[in-house]
Amino acid sequence: MMVGIVGKPNVGKSTFFSAATLAPAEIANYPFTTIKPNRGVGYVRSPCVCREFNVKDNPVNSLCINGMRLIPVELIDCAGLVPGAWQGRGLGNQFLDEIRKADALIHIIDASGATDLEGRVLKPGAHDPLEDVKFLEVEITMWLVNILKRDWAKLARTVESGGKDLLSSLEERLSGLTIKRSHIFEAVRATGLNPEKPASWSEEEFVAFVDNLRQIAKPMLIVANKIDLPHAEENLERLKNLNYMVVPCCAEAELALRRAAEKELISYTPGDCNFKINNPEKLTAAQIKALETIREKILLKYGSTGVQEAINTAFFKLLNMIVVYPVEDIEHLTDHQGRVLPDAYLVPYGTTAREFAYMIHTELGDTFIYAVEAREKKRIGENHVLKDRDVISIVSAKKRA
Ligand SMILES: Nc1nc2c(ncn2[C@@H]2O[C@H](COP(=O)(O)OP(=O)(O)O)[C@@H](O)[C@H]2O)c(=O)[nH]1
Ligand SMILES: [Mg+2]
């Protein structure tokens, strides 16, 4: 699963991306590196089960900082979008090539209204950020409309002559855009259009269908960035009236905190509502003042800088992912090397015990007999649906290599 960071130019996408992908100091030598200039590894944050089970863990595929599991996820910093991108304006084609791969979108907005639709700098309050929401919806929908329109007539004829059903035709057509069969199915149902008679859909119905498909296949949340600037707070309240989850954010503050934490000047875990200055004597008066302003104006007021919350919301709420810990020894919660709670997997809600076994290893799925859940120490069958923060041991017919 991959999440795209989108929006018009100059709203703070790259600042958000840099902050989100700056690895915590504890793992300076961690093997996760930037994949491409605009692709990187961020983290979702989930309370680790180590505290509840009262064990000291040895994380391998993830990190555990002060009882918080940080699990790596992939982020894309998409090119800035300007009106008309779907027709190839600006970096339109590059942008669209990037959101092709995204399962969900984080729409960064300059909540202070200090940038126009093209990203030019204005005074705070000069632009209405609600317009940006509409604009991005239109751009992405029109891009999809454009792709589908090219051979819609032909596709519709084939469907109506019984050649191939609509779901299969569209699935094939949209497979490169991270749009799944289930998304298409849902969009057909939501619009109430007849999937057997696509040639009879009006232009308006066709666009409504595509717009629905966009909402389902590319779910989006709004990050009200630059919350530190004038007018941002009142715009935040207005943004909350739209049909989106909205996270107030100061990407610049998160970047400053992570950089200070990287140098061990402060103790701060991404997503925390506070930080501790380690050695005040190593900081200038101006640096201390800047940090205290962040504490007072952002952290204490909004509960966090919003960067971590946005990533968590994207993966846990938009994409409905849960965290599952596989172990071999259910008594000691260890793997075959004796490491305690080594891995935390991010899996879709609805994953069954057997599907989970397949995610770990094909052979483990093939030879699955049953699983054991660590809290109740109960056996669970192959079709048992896993819950968030479950600790699971899989018993299989063959010992894993
Ligand atoms: N006041 C304020 N400025 C920010 C914030 N985030 C980013 N910026 C500034 O906004 C400008 C554009 O940021 P950038 O990340 O390059 O935007 P992008 O074009 O969307 O990638 C830069 O001058 C940033 O320092 C924020 O939370 N508050
Ligand atoms: Mg940028």
Image (cartoon, rainbow, N blue to C red):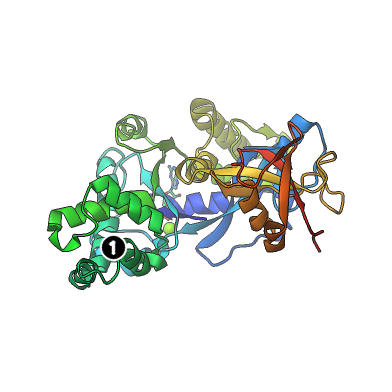
Vertical placement of residue 169 versus 182, above or below = below
* Ligand 1 within 8 angstroms of badge 1 C-beta: no
| Along the viewing direction, whichever of 244 and 249 lies nearer the viewer | 244
| Along the viewing direction, whichever of 183 and 17 lies nearer the viewer | 183
For the point 53% across and 27% down, the residue is: 296
Q: Position of residue 364 (x, y in %)?
A: 72, 58
Q: Is residue 278 visible?
A: no
- The answer to whether 242 appears left or right of 65 in the picture is left
Helix, strand, or loop for circle 1? Answer: helix
Q: Which residue is mark 1?
A: 166
The amino acid at mark 1 is: Leu
Q: Quadrant of the C terminus?
A: bottom right
- Categorize mark 1 by other alpha carbons within 10 Å: few (<14), some (14-19), many (20+): many
- The answer to whether 152 appears left or right of 297 in the picture is left
Q: Position of residue 173 (x, y in %)?
A: 33, 69
For the point 24% across and 44% down, the residue is: 131
Q: Is residue 193 visible?
A: yes
Q: Position of residue 216 (x, y in %)?
A: 36, 49
**Number of marks:** 1
- The answer to whether 162 appears left or right of 218 in the picture is left
| Along the viewing direction, whichever of 377 and 313 lies nearer the viewer | 377
For residue 143, what is the image quadrant?
bottom left
Q: Residue furthest right?
A: 338
Q: Position of residue 375 (x, y in %)?
A: 73, 32
For the point 16% across and 63% down, the residue is: 199
- The answer to whether 51 appears left or right of 91 in the picture is right
For residue 286, what is the image quadrant?
top right
| Along the viewing direction, whichever of 385 and 223 lies nearer the viewer | 385
